[in-house]
Every structure is written in C-alpha cells, then in structure tokens.
Amino acid sequence: MVQTPVQGTTFGNPSYSAVIHTTYAISPTLLNEAAFNYNGNRIIISPIGLVSAPSGFTFHRLFTGPNNNDRIPNISLSGATGTAVGNNSWPWVPTRPDDYQIRDDVSWTKGAHQLKMGGSWADL
C-alpha cells in the first residue's frame, strides 16, 4: 500500500473594532448622545503541506471547479456519518466583511417625565 501525503490549511480570522462615543449636554434638561461603531474581520485560509500532486499521480475529483497547481484534496473521516471533503486548491481571501453603524439619541427631562428618542443607521 502506498500512502500519499495530502494538504491541509491554516485558518486565520483577525478581527477589528472601534467605537467613538460622545455625550453633549445642550441644556440641563436636554442631552444628546452620538456614536460611531466599526466592526470587521478578515478570514484567511491558506494551504499548507503538499503543494502539488506527485508526478504520475492521478485522482478522481468529487467536485468540479478550479484546482490551481493540481493539488490533492483533503479528506476527513470521523464517526459514523461525519465525512468532509475539501479541495484546498488555492489560498482563499474573501471580501472584507465590514460593519459600520451611526447612532444618535436625544433625551429630554421635564419634571418627573423623561422622553428619549433616537435613530441609527447600519451598513452591513
């Protein structure tokens, strides 16, 4: 029996966030709060291990699509029904999922009564 090494991947997911928040007292009974939020992450999947198939080695692909550098797919078997097949055909760096949000709230106090209203906008 000949064993042929396959290729794995490294998974990186750095994330970033920032908040700018300010509160302004317009008068003793009127308060304004504004905030800007940013969240984002980067998902980076890079192949490691065997870069290409050994010369003369052929295999039947389970899925269609590009296979840059003629890489061997990885196969993971676990449990009775837990089977996963991946292609590992290229480094994967998707679009950057960034999230921006702007929020503004106004609070007004009159005697024993308080009214608060505001709005927000999010770009997901």
Image: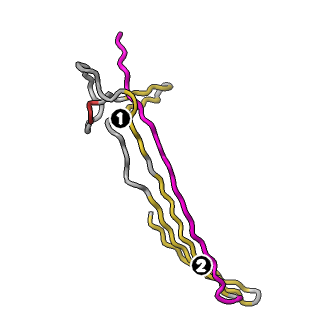
Which residue corresponds to mark 2? 105
Q: Residue at x 41, y 41 (%)?
A: 45
Nearest-to-viewer mark from 2 and 1:
1
Quadrant, the C terminus: bottom left
Which residue corresponds to mark 1? 88
Whether residue 30 is situated above or below residue 100 in the rendered picture: below
| Residue 96 x/y as whole percent | 41, 55
Query: For residue 9: magenta?
Result: yes
Quadrant, the N terminus: top left
Q: Are the residues at dot 2 and dot 1 in contact (C-beta closer than 8 Å)? A: no
Q: Residue at x 47, y 53 (%)?
A: 41
Between 64 and 24, the one lying in front of the other is 24
Mark 2 element type: strand
Give the quarter of the image for residue 86: top left
| Main secondary structure of the magenta stretch | strand
Q: Residue type at mark 2: give it.
A: Asp
Whether residue 39 is situated above or below residue 107 in the rendered picture: above
Q: Which residues are magenta?
A: 1-28
Whether residue 18 is situated above or below residue 87 in the rendered picture: below
- The single residue placed furthest to the right in the displayed view is 112
Q: Earlier in the sequence, mark 2 or mark 1?
A: 1
Query: For residue 56: magenta?
Result: no
| Residue 118 x/y as whole percent | 57, 78
Label 2, residues with CA under 10 Å away: few <14, some 14-19, many ≥20: some
Between 45 and 1, the one lying in front of the other is 45
Mark identifier at residue 45? none
Q: Residue at x 56, y 72 (%)?
A: 35
Q: Residue at x 66, y 87 (%)?
A: 30
Q: Residue type at mark 1: give it.
A: Asn
Mark 1 element type: loop
**In the visual, does 121 lie left or right of 6?**
right
| Residue 36 x/y as whole percent | 53, 70
